[in-house]
Amino acid sequence: SSHLPDARPLFSFAARSGVPAGFRPPPRRVVVTGGAGFVGSHLVDRLLEQGDSVIVVDNFFTGRKENVAHHLRNPRFELLRHDVVEPILLEVDRIYHLACPASPVHYKYNPIKTIKTNVMGTLNMLGLAKRIGARFLLTSTSEVYGDPLEHPQKETYWGNVNPIGVRSCYDEGKRTAETLTMDYHRGGGVEVRIARIFNTYGPRMCLDDGRVVSNFVAQALRRQPMTVYGDGKQTRSFQYVSDLVAGLMALMESDHIGPFNLGNPGEFTMLELAQVVKETIDPMATIEFKPNTADDPHMRKPDITKAKQLLHWEPKVSLKEGLPLMVTDFRQRISDE
Ligand code: NAD
Ligand code: UDP
Ligand code: UDP
């Protein structure tokens, strides 16, 4: 790795995570699948900033070249259009496996493709990790808990998931991806990490991906009513993207396999969320009730005790602090339309 520059910025969350001040991780060769997407592109920003070389593998289903365009002239950055359902040969030290549509609208658009991405895509990335001895991190989801009968959810909870429903391509797909990950660890000796991500928001989310925060923000900016599904009393916990990226990087470089819940325990009903969006964007914003979708979980809130204790990680950005940062980005993109 002699071609890599010597000067590397400080490990960005070192101070917060209990790592000695001045600690610099060695530069690595990293693959980020799904790196042109929302979470992936923010992760790529931080990895390049810390001196790593990054290869993004993305089929651009929901990702956009614009999300990583600012790195295209960086010699430590490479962008590959590739579908993880197909095998690939690469030589790297770390694999962050994010490739998978995350919003219900996108993952239900072609459920067969979604389950193939979760199963065959994860299998290929684990096969790659095994062949080259790379460490592999899976971005799983709080959806593995289904419509939970335990609240808040701990990692020890096995979930309440419908195996044949319209969300199954995603939640059962991710459960299978977790199984594959543990089997490659136990049977194939692969070093693995599993993160269970709770609802995350921030700049670069798709404007019309149907998720609640992006919907409400785009609707309020366009002076349309915010669409509340069902009675709006269902709850979610919303994490700002920079907190998630810090958690993913802390997990990857930790000695722990997981699974770890990564989410912000602040819990809101959809009606409360609409109120925060209203206060942030437009005091005149209105809401409109719509029928809810099938199998919608009634409540969701992470128990993050395990990540706090073992990764020394916890989210820093509250909804009221994070939302304006996303609104600035959405306002710009909506005015460019
Ligand atoms: P996103 O849709 O913005 O990003 C997913 C990326 O994967 C996109 O760039 C897409 O083009 C790419 N992709 C999809 N299928 C692919 C395939 N077959 N081959 C190659 N690339 C493919 O979503 P996101 O919010 O950034 O989510 C990233 C990961 O985090 C996903 O695995 C998702 O399941 C997980 N996650 C996200 C959230 C959240 O709230 N954002 C919550 C839980 C889990
Ligand atoms: N694989 C890949 N890149 C590699 C190594 C493996 O894409 O560098 C794929 C491979 O094509 C296979 C999957 O990963 O579909 C699982 O690989 P493994 O070696 O575990 O299984 P096998 O090839 O023996 O079925
Ligand atoms: N939701 C809503 N209005 C919208 C989009 C979603 O009220 O315009 C609700 C949805 O029914 C769910 C919650 O918001 O209860 C979170 O939905 P999202 O699709 O963002 O994520 P999920 O946690 O269901 O994957």
Image (tube, rainbow, N blue to C red):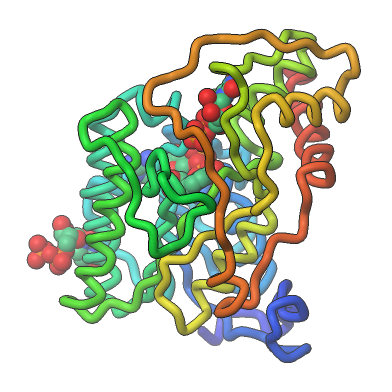
330 with respect to 5 (left or right): right
Q: Measuring 65% from the left and 44% from the top, which residue is drawn there? A: 238
Q: Measuring 77% from the left and 17% from the top, which residue is drawn there? A: 220
Asked whether the viewer can see residue 304, the reply is yes
Q: Nearer the viewer, residue 129 or 233?
A: 233
Q: Nearer the viewer, residue 229 or 336?
A: 229
For this orientation, the residue located farthest to the right is: 283
Corner quadrant of residue 90:
bottom left
**Residue 8 in the image, given as x and y percentages of width and height:** 71, 80
Q: Can you say whether 263 is above or below 91 in the image?
A: above
Q: Nearer the viewer, residue 261 or 207?
A: 261
Q: Measuring 66% from the left and 50% from the top, which residue is drawn there? A: 241
**Residue 258 in the image, given as x and y percentages of width and height:** 42, 71
316 with respect to 64 (left or right): right
Q: Can you say whether 74 is above or below 174 in the image?
A: below
**Residue 76 in the image, given as x and y percentages of width and height:** 57, 66
Q: Can you say whether 309 is above or below 334 in the image?
A: below
287 with respect to 104 (left or right): right
Q: Can you say whether 304 is above or below 70 in the image?
A: below
Q: Measuring 59% from the left and 17% from the top, which residue is drawn there? A: 231
Instruction: Name the quadrant of the C terminus.
Output: top right
Asked whether the viewer can see residue 34, the reply is no
**Residue 115 in the image, given as x and y percentages of width and height:** 25, 39
113 with respect to 297 (left or right): left
Q: How many marks?
A: 0
Corner quadrant of residue 73:
bottom right
